[in-house]
């Protein structure tokens, strides 16, 4: 074989030396800074925003640096379809181990018989379950979005709302609590094929056993979406639905992990599911798996699955359990302070990580929109929220929602909750209301409040 020699005067270039894994993954932030300074600058600004403002959005959380490392790992490069041991691509021996580990840890965390770690989101997990067991036009019975439910549970604008017949149950107008007797009576009239429980804006304990009894009486499957409270469930700070519901779904970022979804099953995992043609049957877990791929989504996000494995290990720790109970105690303390200051706190308090406040009853002209934006101007991050039987539109709202997962993770406790409540009250008292969305905050007051917020956050840095 002839080997062509370099031309005279040419410079021979040596091949780049292969890096080991530690070298490859080291200093990724510096690599990004060199490759794309604009994106690096924006990421730096977002870090500074998170570090120097009070994060009180109930739907947000903060993952560990170990989870971040897994998300930014070389596993991102692997493509495959299917589940561990039955892939549609080669080279899966390592990622099979990673997914199997994630599944095993998820089952241990939630005491489940089956776990599916592939859903790309909590909403995706819901849609996988819904389309696995329902045919177009089948009936779904769920908590209305403006009553504390979630858009993916069948709101008219959602996927489920467009392809299935949906009826909603509500909370009581006098107490804003779930009325299980009324839900049962409505379910008996409607006769759904799927009953959904779990909420995105409900501050009290959910009776999953009662929901299962209703589902059994009307011949429906029960899906419990615990995205907001899954960390509390894992730690034992809220009752678990895993052996009550046929399917339990959650996002994995709300309890403090990476973006993604999770489907869990308990005692019903092997229950036979009869296909639409009325012929063959398969276990429910297998139906869910086949509807994940190829039914609903394709390639799994293997870096997110790897990060889920890391996070599930964290969830098994005493530190994580203590954090979850601390979240509830801080939420109770914060809600109690608002009640003492005369605010209208829905249901009179909270059993979980969040609570709702009717700010329209606090000051004439106050709206959720103004509350959210004037607080953000002062470094306090919350979200406006439409309340049950709200008189304002979804774009304005009468309410605000506050949650304590992030401030608790960073070490804040009861004294800080007293301070935070007072600061929120100071801002909402001082803001000049000029319309449903128009307001003015004195620049000197705003600057002083932001400075105090930053000083507090500096004492409790991101962990």
Image (cartoon, grey):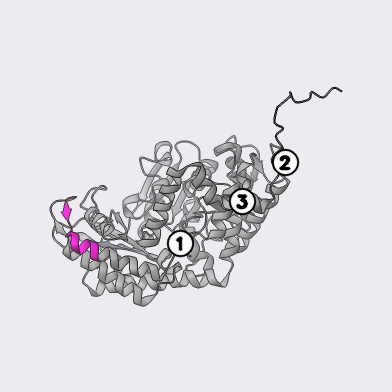
Q: Residue sitting at 35 percent across and 70 percent down?
A: 456
**Which stretch appears magenta?**
437-448
Q: Residue sitting at 53 percent across and 50 percent down?
A: 30
Q: Residue sitting at 43 percent across and 50 percent down?
A: 43
Q: Is residue 177 above or below residue 269?
A: below
Q: Which residue is mark 3?
A: 25
Q: Nearer the viewer, mark 3 or mark 1?
A: 3
Q: Which residue is mark 1?
A: 229
- Residue 235 makes an appearance in the image: yes
**Quadrant in the rendering for residue 204:** bottom left
Please state which of residues 157 and 167 is positioned toward the viewer in this rendering: 157
Is label 3 in a helix, a strand or a loop?
helix
Is label 2 in a helix, a strand or a loop?
loop
C-alpha span from label 2 to label 1: 37 Å
* Magenta-colored stretch includes residue 234: no
Quick check: 182 left or right of 363?
A: right
Q: Residue sitting at 55 percent across and 39 percent down?
A: 297
C-alpha span from label 3 to label 1: 33 Å
Q: Which residue is mark 2?
A: 91
- Residue 175 makes an appearance in the image: no
Give the crowd class for mark 2: few <14, some 14-19, many >=20 residues within 10 Å. few
C-alpha span from label 3 to label 2: 21 Å
Give the mark, 3 or 1, whose residue is nearer the N terminus. Answer: 3
Residue 16: x %, y % from top left: 69, 40
The label on residue 161 is: none
Give the crowd class for mark 1: few <14, some 14-19, many >=20 residues within 10 Å. many
Quick check: 254 left or right of 366?
A: right
Name the quarter where the N terminus is drawn: top right
The answer to whether mark 3 and mark 2 are in CB contact below 8 A is: no
Please state which of residues 264 and 11 is positioned toward the viewer in this rendering: 11
């Amino acid at each position: 074989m002839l080997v062509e020699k370099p031309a005279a005067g040419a410079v021979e270039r040596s091949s780049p030396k292969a890096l080991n894994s530690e070298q490859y993954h080291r200093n990724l932030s510096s690599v990004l800074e060199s490759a794309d300074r604009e994106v690096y600058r924006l990421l730096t600004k977002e870090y500074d925003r998170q570090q120097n403002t009070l994060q009180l959005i109930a739907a947000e959380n903060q993952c560990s640096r170990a989870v971040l490392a897994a998300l930014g790992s070389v596993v991102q490069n692997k493509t495959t379809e299917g589940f561990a041991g039955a892939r549609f691509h080669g080279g899966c021996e390592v990622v099979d181990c990673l997914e199997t580990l994630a599944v095993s840890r998820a089952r241990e965390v939630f005491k489940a018989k089956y776990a599916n770690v592939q859903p790309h989101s909590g909403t995706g997990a819901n849609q996988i379950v819904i389309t696995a067991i329902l045919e177009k036009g089948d009936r779904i019975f769920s908590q209305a979005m403006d009553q504390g439910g979630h858009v993916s549970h069948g709101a008219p604008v959602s996927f489920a709302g467009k392809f299935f017949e949906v009826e909603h149950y509500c909370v009581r107008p006098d107490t804003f609590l779930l009325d299980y007797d009324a839900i049962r009576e409505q379910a008996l009239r409607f006769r759904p094929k799927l009953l959904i429980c779990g909420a995105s804006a409900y501050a009290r304990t959910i009776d999953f056993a009662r929901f299962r009894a209703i589902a059994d009486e009307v011949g429906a499957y029960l899906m419990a979406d615990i995205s907001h409270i899954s960390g509390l469930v894992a730690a034992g700070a809220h009752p678990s639905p895993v052996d009550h519901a046929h399917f339990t779904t959650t996002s994995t970022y709300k309890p403090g992990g990476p973006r993604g979804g999770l489907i869990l099953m308990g005692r019903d995992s092997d229950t036979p599911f009869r296909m639409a043609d009325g012929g063959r049957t398969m276990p429910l877990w297998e139906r869910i798996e086949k509807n994940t791929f190829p039914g609903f989504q394709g390639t799994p996000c293997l870096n997110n699955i790897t990060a889920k494995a890391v996070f599930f290990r964290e969830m098994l720790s005493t530190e994580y359990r203590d954090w979850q109970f601390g979240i509830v105690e801080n939420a109770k303390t914060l809600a109690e302070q608002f009640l003492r200051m005369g605010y209208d706190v829905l249901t009179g308090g909270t059993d979980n990580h969040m609570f709702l406040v009717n700010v329209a009853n606090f000051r004439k002209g106050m709206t959720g929109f103004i509350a959210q934006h004037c607080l953000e101007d002062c470094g306090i991050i919350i979200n406006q929220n439409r309340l049950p039987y709200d008189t304002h539109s979804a774009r304005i709202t009468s309410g605000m929602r506050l949650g304590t997962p992030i401030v608790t993770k960073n070490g804040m406790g009861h004294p800080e909750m007293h301070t935070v409540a007072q600061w929120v009250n100071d801002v909402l008292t001082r803001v000049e209301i000029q319309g449903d969305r128009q307001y003015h905050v004195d620049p000197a007051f705003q600057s002083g409040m932001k400075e105090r917020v930053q000083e507090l956050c500096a004492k409790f840095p991101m962990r």
